[in-house]
Amino acid sequence: MDLSVRIGSLALKNPLMSASGCFGYGLEYKDIVDLSSLGAVVVKGLFLKEREGHPPPRIVETPSGMLNAIGLQGIGVHRFVREKMPELRELGAVVVVNVCGVSIDEYAEVTRILSDCEGVAAIELNISCPNIKEGGIQFGCHLDSTFAVVSAVRKVTSLPLIPKLTPNVTSVSSFAKASEDAGADAVSLVNTFLAMVVDVETRRPKISNGMGGLSGPAIRPIAVRMVYECARAVRIPVIGMGGIASAQDVLEFMIAGATAVQVGTANFVDPFIWPKLLAGVEDYLRRHTIERVADLVGTVQL
């Protein structure tokens, strides 16, 4: 069976990718996960400089999910290149870097630095984090801004460029089309849904930021629908995510139109999930006598 898929010029040995923000820089999991066995490791979001993020508490469990407002804490692009990439290269990981910014210039500069770094395979453009007031989602909620930031970053890199889209808009497929028109090689979706949890005893939000991003199985059916809509709207590949916790979930996203998938919140529940997902996908292909997993993409019948 052939588990390989292609995201533009990027060839992945299988469709399983870690989701940014839920897998650290990959190295945190190296003792329990063979990073080279994944299709790709998508690392935590990087700004030009280090960022502390929001004060705790900033994660709370919800029914069938998790609410977080980390605030894009990170070590910055220079420390990542210097401290993390050498070991990631040594471990044989396919590295996709999630790029953040508070301005178009910052997105472009971080991307330019990473494009000169050996081992970076692709850029995921974070224009969809709901947990910060500056940058991020302000680019991802306006079509003109999405087009502008993707266009600007496209000019400074030849690496595969993958804008990460927010579900907190009326028509996510229109943002996928704007990204494609601006030169994106693929889109990834969905990022978290803006949500809120209140402690009824204190009458205060359970996380310090007040609101945060909801992830986990609770959002999966909505994410599948949005992936389906985007896959029908664009010619470029779609990377799907949102509550994937089993091989069946992986297959559901791919049948709906995703070429590859990202697994996020499930890493906190079961860090040993990766070989189980691969085994389940292989078993499905075997039972259905399908030779190439790529042949499943977009085969949903309505």
Image (spheres, rainbow, N blue to C red):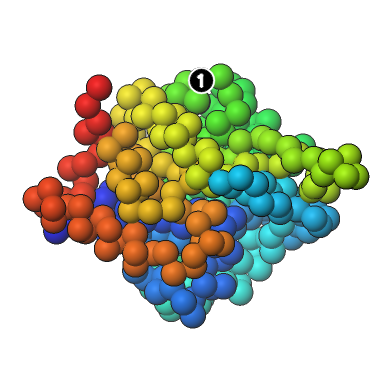
**Left or right, 11 with reference to 43:** left
**Left or right, 301 with reference to 218:** left
Residue displayed at 79% across by 48% down: 207
Task: Please identify the residue farthest to the front as the structure is shown.
Answer: 201
Vertical comparison of 127 with 66: above or below: above
How many numbered markers are drawn? 1
**Left or right, 191 with reference to 201:** left
Mark 1 sits on what residue?
171
- Where is residue 180 shown, x and y percent of the image? 41, 29
Residue displayed at 56% across by 19% down: 170
Residue displayed at 12% across by 48% down: 288
Q: Residues within 10 Å of mark 1 (few under 14, many from 20)?
A: some
Q: Is residue 102 visible?
A: no
Vertical comparison of 76 with 88: above or below: above
Q: In the picture, which quadrant includes the N terminus? A: bottom left
Residue type of the residue flagged with mark 1: Ser
Vertical comparison of 229 with 166: above or below: above
Q: Nearer the viewer, residue 230 or 106?
A: 230
Q: Secondary structure at mark 1?
A: loop
- Where is residue 23 shown, x and y percent of the image? 54, 62
Vertical comparison of 226 with 125: above or below: above
Quadrant of res 53: bottom right
Q: Is residue 87 visible?
A: yes
Q: Nearer the viewer, residue 138 or 256?
A: 256
- Where is residue 270 shown, x and y percent of the image? 49, 65
Q: In the picture, which quadrant includes the C terminus? A: top left
Residue displayed at 84% across by 41% down: 200
